[in-house]
DNA sequence: CAGTGGTCTAGACCACACG
DNA sequence: GTGTGGTCTAGACCACTGT
């Protein structure tokens, strides 16, 4: 067995190996939660030494694409985005348990992509996109008001289901209904004084500070799959960063 | 040559090696900007193989403690924190060049540590600390209002210099005057409506949204050296994160 | 040129998971 | 016990830096 042709021979072997593995994951040849072949097997397949194979796998583990378990194997990592919400918002029960906030879809429509959305999703402006408006609520308190945009072509199936059946988490829904797996994301955080529309939605006084999180979610092949903008009350927000 | 005694023999060799190197850096045996011994030299000193030495160094590079340059050597990394400011604030000239905002010390005093400060710096409440009040200004526009607390014992020398000679960056000053090197930091971000005191300082209307950044700065030995709380106008703020 | 880190090999043995 | 990843060795050769 050998490499798919497109790799540059001048690149180090472990790099090409990393890219090759990464592509097989992107193409869902190995799916999230599944084990990839053993190190010994990969050594044979790519006629590389164990050290080189391990270095390639090391990189994918560092990137968060793979997960290793001694004695069991190496697995494609299933991204856990719910936790990202809790990196930002200290909305937890006293016991410290993490609750998934209830998600209510307020609106679902097909529209032409506004220019900001089109450029984020890297599609032509005016392309049809699905727009969802969603409110996330915890213990009766509005937590987040979200606007979500999806390329229609990939997510057409979402138009067939009743929005009441969407459930509280969208990414598993994307996977089940549309075969689209979210592998990573980029977020931009800002803050602003709440506008009247969101003040009503979030039950906040006029001009109260809100956090704005814009998230671009990507597949394993790094294609943009979803763009969303979420707003939440600033006093519920705390984000922690380590710097070196 | 051998390891300092305290390392646990059950730990993998590359781990013990990493810890040993890390300690030598913390103790300023090798200082920021200086090269550490070559890989071949470390192989001899620790009677390990080249692969093991490289793995230990790899870890410190990944942590941001060391920096490698092919053909030149491996160097203790000098933390560059000015950049952290610009990760958060999009205050740049049109050309994209990064300007260091002017720093004006408004007040310098010795006080007993408030409990929040004491717990952040991990010292007993009531211990004497140096408190600095500082305004950072770019092109005449107030950017950040900062309150900075330092353990008096380590930073006594700062009391001897006129505050007008502090300059625009404090961390180089800490290093030159007090021998204290900042190696890493943790930041917490929140947002709030500005209070009257900071509205005046930052020239903002009442209740405007401000970003609040609390930073704990640590030495190479991870001892807390400085705690600060900074506030800046939210519309100047944008923070970018990657999630996996 | 000599000296540095970067890549790669071909093994050995250990620690852990699971049937 | 068998199979997996984890640690470690002892080299070889390449690519880059500085003199």
Image (cartoon, coloured by chain):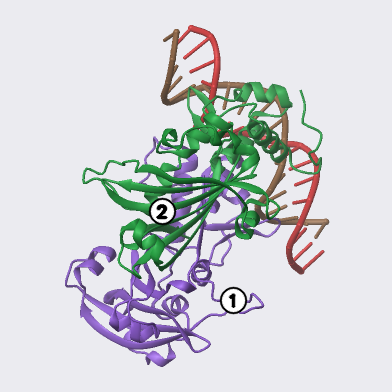
Chain colours: A purple, B green, C red, D brown
Q: Residues within 10 Å of mark 2 (few under 14, many from 20)?
A: many
Give the residue displayed 58% in from the left and 35% down from the top. Answer: B180
Q: Secondary structure at mark 2?
A: strand
Residue that badge 1 annotates: A98
Q: Chain of mark 2?
A: B
Above-or-below relation of A87 to B122? below
Q: CA distance from mark 1 to mark 2?
A: 35 Å
Residue that badge 2 annotates: B145
Residue at the far left: name it.
A126
Q: Chain of mark 1?
A: A
Above-or-below relation of B224 to B230? above
Q: Nearer the viewer, residue A26 or B18?
A: B18
Horizontal and vertical percent position of residue A96 = 64, 74
Q: Nearer the viewer, residue A5 or B130?
A: B130
Horizontal and vertical percent position of residue A169 = 47, 80
Q: Is residue B199 visible?
A: yes
């Amino acid at each position: 067995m050998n490499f798919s042709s497109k790799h540059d021979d001048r690149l180090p072997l472990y790099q090409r190996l990393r890219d090759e593995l990464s592509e097989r994951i992107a193409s869902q040849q190995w799916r999230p939660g599944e084990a990839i072949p053993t190190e010994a097997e990969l050594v044979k397949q790519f006629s590389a030494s164990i050290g080189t194979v391990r270095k390639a796998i090391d990189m994918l583990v560092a990137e968060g694409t793979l997960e290793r378990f001694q004695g069991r194997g190496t697995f494609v990592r299933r991204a856990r985005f719910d936790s990202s919400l809790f990196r930002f918002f200290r909305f937890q029960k006293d016991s410290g348990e993490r609750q998934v906030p209830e998600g209510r879809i307020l609106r679902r429509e097909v529209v032409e992509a506004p220019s900001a959305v089109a450029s984020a999703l890297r599609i032509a402006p005016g392309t049809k996109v699905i727009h969802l408006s969603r409110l996330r609520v915890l213990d009766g308190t509005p937590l987040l008001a979200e606007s979500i945009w999806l390329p229609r072509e990939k997510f057409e199936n979402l138009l067939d289901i009743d929005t009441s059946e969407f459930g509280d988490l969208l990414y598993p829904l994307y996977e089940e209904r549309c075969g689209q797996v979210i592998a990573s994301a980029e977020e931009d955080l800002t803050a602003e004084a709440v506008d009247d529309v969101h003040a009503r939605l979030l039950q906040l006084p006029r001009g109260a500070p809100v956090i704005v999180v814009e998230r671009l979610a990507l597949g394993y092949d790094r294609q943009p799959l979803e763009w969303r903008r979420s707003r939440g009350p600033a006093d519920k927000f705390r984000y922690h960063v380590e710097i070196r």
